[in-house]
Amino acid sequence: MYYVNDKPHVGHAFTTVAADVMARWHRLNGEKVFFLTGTDEHGEKNQKAAETNGLTPQQYVDGLANTYKDVWKCLNISYDAFIRTSSPSHEAAAAKFIEMMNKSGDIYKGEYEGWYCVPDETFFTDFQLAGGKCPDCGREVKKVKEESYFFRLSRYQQRLLDHYSDNPEFLSPELRSGEIKNRVKAGLRDLSITRASIKWGVPFPLDRSRTVYVWVEALVGYLSGIGWPNGDSGSIWPADTHLVGKEINWFHSVIWPAMLMSAGLPVPKRIFAHGWWTVDGKKMSKSIGNIVDPVGMVKKYSADPFRYFLIREKPLSEDGDFSDKAMVTRINGELVDDLGNLVSRTVTLASRFNGPISGKPELESYLRLERINGLMARFDPFGALEEIWSFIRSTNKYVNDKAPWRLQGSELANALYNLAEACRIISILISPFMPDTSAKINSQLGVGAGMLEDCRFGEFRGRITKGEHLFRKVA
Ligand SMILES: [Zn+2]
């Protein structure tokens, strides 16, 4: 779920494409999947931006939510539900959640004093400021002092630490878990959860003159988005994974599980905090003017190569750099030369061959399906693509070694059988990453869309017809 204040950039596209790849992979494995995304729409920033634009806050966020939906359509994102936190069902769920926390005795009235960064919607203590400025964005902060309701976050310190040690995957990737554990060990302060001055928000159910702190309320979107407290949300919750950027790890790995513990609900099985993108070696920013627009990328390279690049260029957990140069290199090398060429050679040779394509599986030992599955289970689609490409390269080497254009009869039928089966399996394996390309391969092989269980060499039953090249070289 994204805090909306502008159109999505490459960072947003990365998170959502990664989530889409994971969702599609698990569907391919025959599992029931519910993929939720959405927009977090309240808060002072949007209230102000709406005023500046002469709109009501609702009109303003309606436009932004539609922009997000359009971009996800353009990137072929297969989400099951899109939650908007300004929807009445979300507001009702957030109010219900807070009442449950209150029943646990975890909410009290006190006085809040701190520093507030308006663009980030975040409060900081004196200790957290960096040279008197916002530690996240470096901008001016303003002093805020008001009566507020608090959540007894401090009460959950030990339960959180116990949860982290009992569930090592909860804080993923491991390289980011130490920081969270150390901060929780250092002590948790109770959290101010209401705002008296901010009107664009969910009314606080215990005192409707205030609104709920946008962060606290937005997290409940993971529940309201699956229909909680109604519907069959019980069969979906707890979520298997929340995929988030590392800058919001604290809210998801500390505040959110504590809120759920307070409300008596199960916590998600894993919070995966991914790394960031720089662009041409620089931090993305409006002032530099280097913000990468995903729609522009799709227009230039089409959706599948862009999706492929985002996942293949860097591991999910790490930071990486985006550049057109790197994108062009991967398209011309891995997509055109490796995959496109393999499929083209296979369908060209096979469509000229009259007779049944059959033989014995000689390429199967190069297919490391268990390893690929294991990498995907560990949330490493980058590693999985590396393995899939290793199989593609082995298959290309097989073509070069066998030189089927020099073969005849049963020897040719055997080589074509191995190539056709390899292409069919590759098409299944790449389908979560590049769904359009997979459909194009299937159509040339004359086979339907397969499942993961179909990724083994069997009888080839397709009717091969040569079609267009899958990818075009770019300059
Ligand atoms: Zn800031």
Image (cartoon, rainbow, N blue to C red):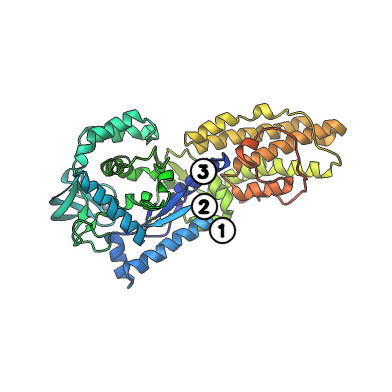
Q: Are marks 2 and 3 in contact (CB under 8 Å)?
A: no
Residue 139 found in image quarter: bottom left
Q: Amino acid at mark 2?
A: Ile
Label whose residue precedes the other's in the sequence (1 or 3)? 3
Q: Which residue is mark 2?
A: 77
Task: Report the side of 416 relative to 65 (left or right).
Answer: right
Asked if residue 188 can be seen in this view, the reply is: no
Q: Nearer the viewer, residue 377 or 351?
A: 377
Residue at x 29%, y 69% (from the top left corner): 51
Q: Residue at x 37, y 51 (%)?
A: 228
Task: Name the image quarter holding residue 162.
Answer: top left
What kind of element bears circle 2?
loop
For the residue labelled by badge 3, is the local secondary structure a helix, a strand or a loop?
loop
Q: Is residue 373 above or below residue 71?
A: above
How far apart are the two marked residues, 1 and 3, measured between alpha carbons? 33 Å
State whether label 1 is within 8 Å of ligand 1. Answer: no
Q: CA distance from mark 1 to mark 2?
A: 16 Å
Residue 241 locus on image (x, y percent): 42, 41
* Residue with the mark numbered 1: 299
Q: Which mark is residue 32?
A: 3
Q: Nearer the viewer, mark 2 or mark 3?
A: 3
Q: Earlier in the sequence, mark 1 or mark 2?
A: 2
The dot on residue 109 is none
